[in-house]
């Protein structure tokens, strides 16, 4: 496990996480999900860790395990209901929005979140393979939820 090899992978995960999941709208959705604030803090600490922190395999395993737990919680608790949570489902009662742009923005978030989560999951798996980490899977694979 060479730290120089891990830094680009960790940088990509950090960029994906901070750009798409460390947003105020997403934190509001996390209230519907069993993700503790401690888990989110631990993920941020891991993503902001330096080269010295990555030299300890236990830190890397703990960080990967936290990221996998986060991804799994979002997959199981948010993804099946993302449109309802954002208020853009055709099955839920229509919310009245002050402006059409807000509806379009929420609809776009509902459409791109599955892709962004999949990208984060792939990046975490790449980091896991690069470190030869054998953390047990949090749960078996889930079906992919498609939005229409």
Image (cartoon, rainbow, N blue to C red):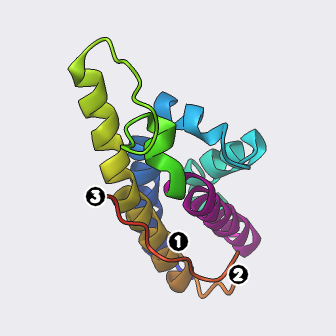
Of callouts 3 and 1, which one flags the residue occurring earlier in the amino acid sequence? 1
- Residue under the image location 76 percent in, 44 percent down: 36
Which of the two residues, 129 or 69, is positioned nearer the viewer here?
69
Q: Is residue 81 above or below residue 97?
A: below
Q: CA distance from mark 2 to mark 3?
A: 34 Å
Where are the magenta residues, as a range?
A: 55-79
Secondary structure mostly seen in magenta is helix
Q: Position of residue 107 (x, y in %)?
A: 30, 39
- Residue under the image location 50 percent in, 28 percent down: 24
Q: Quadrant of the N terminus?
A: bottom right
- Front label number (3 vs 1): 3
Q: Position of residue 96 (x, y in %)?
A: 37, 18
- Residue under the image location 76 percent in, 71 percent down: 58
Q: Is residue 95 above or below residue 125?
A: above
Q: CA distance from mark 3 to mark 1?
A: 41 Å
Of callouts 1 and 2, which one flags the residue occurring earlier in the amino acid sequence? 1
Which of the two residues, 88 or 43, is positioned nearer the viewer here?
88
Residue carrying label 3 = 148
Q: Are marks 1 and 2 in contact (CB under 8 Å)?
A: no
Q: Residues within 10 Å of mark 2 (few under 14, many from 20)?
A: few
Residue carrying label 2 = 135
Left or right of 84: which side holds 27? Answer: right
- Front label number (1 vs 2): 2
- Residue under the image location 51 percent in, 70 percent down: 124
Residue carrying label 1 = 3
Q: Residues within 10 Å of mark 1 (few under 14, many from 20)?
A: some
Displayed quadrant of residue 133: bottom right
Of callouts 2 and 3, which one flags the residue occurring earlier in the amino acid sequence? 2
């Amino acid at each position: 496990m060479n730290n120089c090899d891990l830094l680009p992978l960790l940088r990509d995960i950090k960029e994906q996480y901070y750009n798409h999941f460390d947003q105020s709208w997403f934190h509001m959705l996390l209230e519907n999900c069993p993700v503790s604030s401690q888990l989110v803090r631990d993920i941020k600490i891991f993503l902001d860790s330096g080269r010295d922190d990555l030299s300890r395999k236990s830190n890397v395993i703990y960080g990967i395990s936290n990221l996998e737990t986060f991804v799994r919680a979002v997959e199981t608790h948010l993804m099946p209901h993302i449109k309802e949570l954002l208020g853009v489902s055709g099955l839920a009662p229509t919310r009245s929005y002050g402006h059409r742009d807000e509806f379009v923005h929420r609809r776009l978030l509902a459409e791109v979140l599955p892709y962004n989560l999949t990208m984060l999951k792939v990046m975490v798996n790449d980091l896991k393979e690069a470190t030869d980490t054998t953390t047990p899977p949090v749960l078996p694979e889930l079906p992919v939820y498609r939005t229409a």
